[in-house]
Image (cartoon, rainbow, N blue to C red):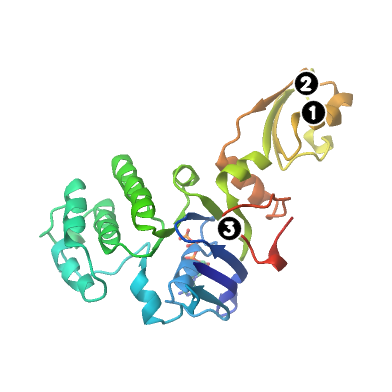
Amino acid sequence: MIEIRGISKSFKDHEVLKDINLKIPDKKILGLIGINGAGKSTLLRVISGIYSADDGVVLVDGENAFDNENVKKKMFFLSDDPFYTARTTPASLLTLMNTFYPVNEVTYFETLDKFKIPIHKRMDKFSKGMKRQVFVSLAFAIRPKYMLLDEAFDGLDPLARVEFKNQIKDMVDKLGTTVIISSHSLKELEDLCDAFAILNNTKIAASGSIEESIGVLHKYQIAFKEDIDIHFFPRIYKHIEKDGRVVRLISELNLKDIEEKLKDMKPVFIDELPIEFEEVFTAIVENGGKMVWKRYSYITLEEESQQF
Ligand SMILES: Nc1ncnc2c1ncn2[C@@H]1O[C@H](COP(=O)(O)OP(=O)(O)OP(=O)(O)O)[C@@H](O)[C@H]1O
């Protein structure tokens, strides 16, 4: 299990992470979500023991992750900008990586073959997506207990993404791998991850199971007879948009409560619409993470930082 306890990290006077607490149980896929510069890469680097934290500790199977050979052996971190030299080919990368990890060569070459990657060509001549496919193949062939993937889908075409996701699910099911994956693409994470954590403003704004989070918020479309000024709209929403006489809002309230709160405004109709995870995420970020959250099943924040 990975336990992140009270992690804080600054670069000079720029505070990036402040008192981050998360427990990630084994054999789960956690999606780490955040806007540009939210600190996703920094957190992954702290978890993988590359960066030291200013405060707090990351425990991997009970051991401090920082600069720890035992932890390095069971964890593979695929950065958003992995290192390779000008002369590196997929074949020579295998030789290099074999000195750090036992790499399953059959899996490596089979995956490269699926992606149609030439194994003896120089990688500096590859497209961004092809380079990504080489490192993804490597991650699968290393079969680590813990796999940390930074911006994993970046540069992959739709077919490669499907292949990548299937391989990740397979590793979790068959090998019991635990995966943390950061991405801007919420849509990509929805069908892959068991749980998510949202990094916002140095903190974990919210975390939990994706299914549960979608159940917490509702989306409504409400039509009125006349144009209305949303500045005077009752504060029953987390997010609101207006299009003429139609208002779309996201709220924690159920349909019955919404109807009750708006009855004096005499809406023509109120429809509940399906809500997407991306909309839940936007509502959380807009509200500075201050949401009433259900108790979640997979990921638990430390008691003192829970937001119920
Ligand atoms: N080595 C470093 N030295 C100084 N500042 C850094 C360093 N690494 C990251 N930062 C700063 O920390 C903040 C968080 O960066 P980080 O790369 O962790 O964010 P991110 O969420 O991964 O962003 P993105 O989605 O754009 O990749 C940024 O403001 C960045 O400039």
Whether residue 183 sits left or right of residue 216 in the image: it is: left
Residue at 78 percent across and 17 percent down: it is 268
Q: Which mark is residue 256?
A: 1
**Residue that carries the numbered disc 2 in the rendered image:** 224
State the SS at label 3. loop
Between the C-alphas of marks 2 and 3, the distance is 41 Å
Mark in front: 1 vs 3:
3
Badge 3 local density, few (<14 within 10 Å), some, or many (20+)? many
**Residue that carries the numbered disc 3 in the rendered image:** 299
State the SS at label 2. loop
Q: Earlier in the sequence, mark 1 or mark 3?
A: 1
Q: Which quadrant, please, contains the C terminus?
A: bottom right
Q: Amino acid at mark 1?
A: Lys
Q: Earlier in the sequence, mark 2 or mark 3?
A: 2
- The total number of labels drawn is 3
Q: Amino acid at mark 2?
A: Phe
